[in-house]
Image (tube, grey):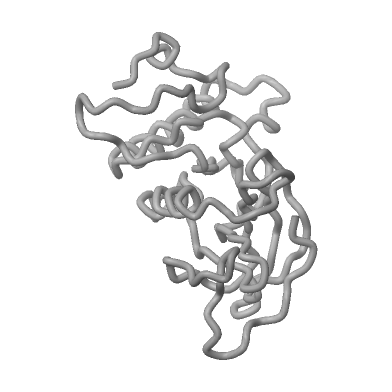
Amino acid sequence: MPTAIRKRPAAGQEPRVHGGKKPRYAFGSITDYEKLEVLGEGTYGEVFKARDRRTGKKVAVKWVRGNGAGGHGPPDISAITREAGCLGACRGHESIIEILDVATDAETGDVFLVMELVADGRTLRESLWRPVSEDVTRVMMEQLLDAAKKIHGAGIIHRDFKPENVMVGFFGGLKVGDFGSAIRAKPARVPYEECCVGTLIYTSPEQLEGNRY
């Protein structure tokens, strides 16, 4: 787990991933972001609040764990770029969290996704501690369905759409996030992998029936 933001690499020095190899993709530098506080931690990484040193803007930064035990070892670059690409394909929608940058630590090879910071910081699950009116429910569903339309229209399948992955901003605005399980949609009749993806209690009937198309 990252405990400090390290010094900026020398001018002209390229960031390197584990093993000393040059990265295949052009990433930004995590030294551009000052870590402020941890917002949450999950199976695949940690999310913390940070300040962009160049603009002063506060952002949310997701540290993506490595493949080894305890989150150590080289990061899965293909998974990271897939998540970043899926977020990027949905950029510009008011109900989807926007990706701002992909950054790396030049010394450790750790990779970070930099995203907009949702002001309120609560998930939809945390907000549903009391019943809401039909009117409020209708507004929420309109936002979520519009976000799903954007995601599917961009050729993306989220695969883990649930209240824990929806952030609530000021005035009740919802933003869908956590595209860690998202993939590009396959052409018709091309099967998906056999493993069950997502959270079991929110799994679609098609998945439970073993439908891979």
* Residue 185 position by quadrant: top left
Residue occupying the point 68% across, 51% down: 47
As drawn, the residue found furthest toward the front would be 19
* Residue 114 position by quadrant: bottom right
Q: Quadrant of the C terminus?
A: top left
Residue 74: image location, x then y, percent: 60, 56
Residue occupying the point 52% across, 27% down: 198
Residue 172: image location, x then y, percent: 59, 40
Q: Quadrant of the N terminus?
A: bottom right
Q: Is residue 127 left or right of residue 114?
A: right
Residue occupying the point 45% across, 36% down: 143
Residue 131: image location, x then y, percent: 66, 19
Number of marks drawn = 0
Q: Nearer the viewer, residue 47 or 195?
A: 195
Q: Is residue 174 above or below residue 24?
A: above
* Residue 55 position by quadrant: bottom right
Q: Nearer the viewer, residue 68 or 124?
A: 68
As drawn, the residue found furthest toward the left would be 188
Residue 142: image location, x then y, percent: 42, 32
Q: Is residue 160 above or below residue 73?
A: above
Residue occupying the point 74% across, 45% down: 70
Q: Nearer the viewer, residue 124 or 8?
A: 8
